[in-house]
Amino acid sequence: MKVKKLVLLTLLVAMFSASVAVAAENYVRKVDNFFILVDRSGSMDEKYVGTKETKIVLAKALLERMNAMIPELGYQGALSTAAPSGELQGLEAYTTAGYGASIAKVPTLIGSNPTPLGVGLKGLEPALQGAVGRSAVIILSDGRENTGEGSLKVAAALAEKYGACFHTISYADTVNGNQALLDAITALKPCGVGVSAAQLTDDAALQKFVKDVFYDDATAVDPCSLDDDNDGVNNCIDKCPDTLPGLAVDADGCPIDDIVTLKINFDFDKSDIKPQYHQELADFASYMRQQQSFTVVEIAGHTDSVGTDEYNQKLSERRAKAVRDYLVNELGMDTNLFSAVGYGESKPISTNDTDEGRAENRRILAELKGVYKKK
């Protein structure tokens, strides 16, 4: 008898696992990454109207129910709290069990915490910055805030920089809360979904919210309507499908080069940098520091045609070295970021038959490449 029960139980588990796998195959994910932010401010310790439980206790229970409805489609998931701001799970591969263990860590004892909701949102930025693809931020809050940078301003900046969609589950009620703020955050992008916690007590409503945020039926999705890297160019024509968030792209979905040029001219037979170029050099160095990546900058030295080829080659090398040394010694740049190369008189940009033309040819030219325009 025990053997029969064990066999039956094994069959049931196998059938359930197969049904989940089939369901997952029928879905396509709407987002690649999701960040859930749970508000733990003092007002979330108050009882939610019409219930005997505090808002934070209800929020944790709702997360547990929602977690059971999210299909495992290869998401990256993170979980954080606001008031105080803290990370319960960094952005990592989503599994129902793993994320459930993180939800279990959400503290339900609050006390009189202030409400820096904007600080909590700001704390998501490092993970958003490193996320690849489409991102969703889901906020569970009553919308109250009384300290720190305004949450709407912070959310708007994150939506703009990283293309994130903001969704809200509201615990605002007629007694306490700021529904207007949550509505404004939800409306930052057309993809935003806003619901009240009261609506989600119904399992069918919660399942709809999960579907609206996380996935679509595979048969209902036109592949050309998808934009996996959220750059504004659909997958069917996107030739650069993994564009990083925040970069401007061309019609093919590829980042647009932002080549910055430094040009300095020299007096005849001189390699010393004239003071009039000091600010230009400082601006070039400052711009380099702001970039996340670029190729090694070649500082190319040039001369006019007066003098022998051998002499001009050495002069052009001294000019390139002078500029590199100024950037390193005077402006604190890393010497490994630059190469100093002399081209002598071999690459004129103007005629060598006039004083003005020769003055144009006595130059260094440096181009910062591998940098892309931002949105």
Image (cartoon, rainbow, N blue to C red):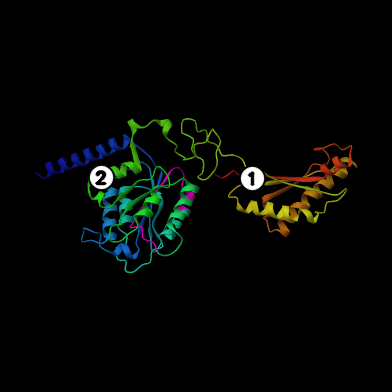
Placement of 170 over or under 353, stated as above or below: below
Q: Position of residue 291 (x, y in %)?
A: 60, 50
Q: Position of residue 1 (x, y in %)?
A: 9, 43
Q: Is residue 226 visible?
A: yes
Q: Residue at x 89, y 39 (%)?
A: 354
* Left or right of residue 54: residue 334: right
Crowding at dot 2, Cα within 10 Å, few <14 / some 14-19 / many 20+, comes out as few
Mark 2 residue element: helix
Mark 1 residue element: loop
Q: Does 74 appear in magenta? A: no
Residue under numbered circle 2: 205
Crowding at dot 1, Cα within 10 Å, few <14 / some 14-19 / many 20+, comes out as few
Residue under numbered circle 1: 295
Q: Name the residue nearer the viewer: 90 or 41.
A: 41
**Is tag 2's residue or tag 1's residue first in the polypeptide sequence?**
2
Residue type highlighted by circle 1: Thr
Q: Is residue 70 visible?
A: no
Q: Which residues are magenta?
A: 126-145
Q: Residue at x 72, y 52 (%)?
A: 280
Q: Position of residue 299 (x, y in %)?
A: 73, 47
Q: Name the residue nearer the viewer: 208 or 102.
A: 208
Q: Nearer the viewer, mark 2 or mark 1?
A: 2
Q: Residue at x 26, y 57 (%)?
A: 58
Placement of 151 over or under 257, stated as above or below: below
Q: Residue at x 60, y 52 (%)?
A: 290
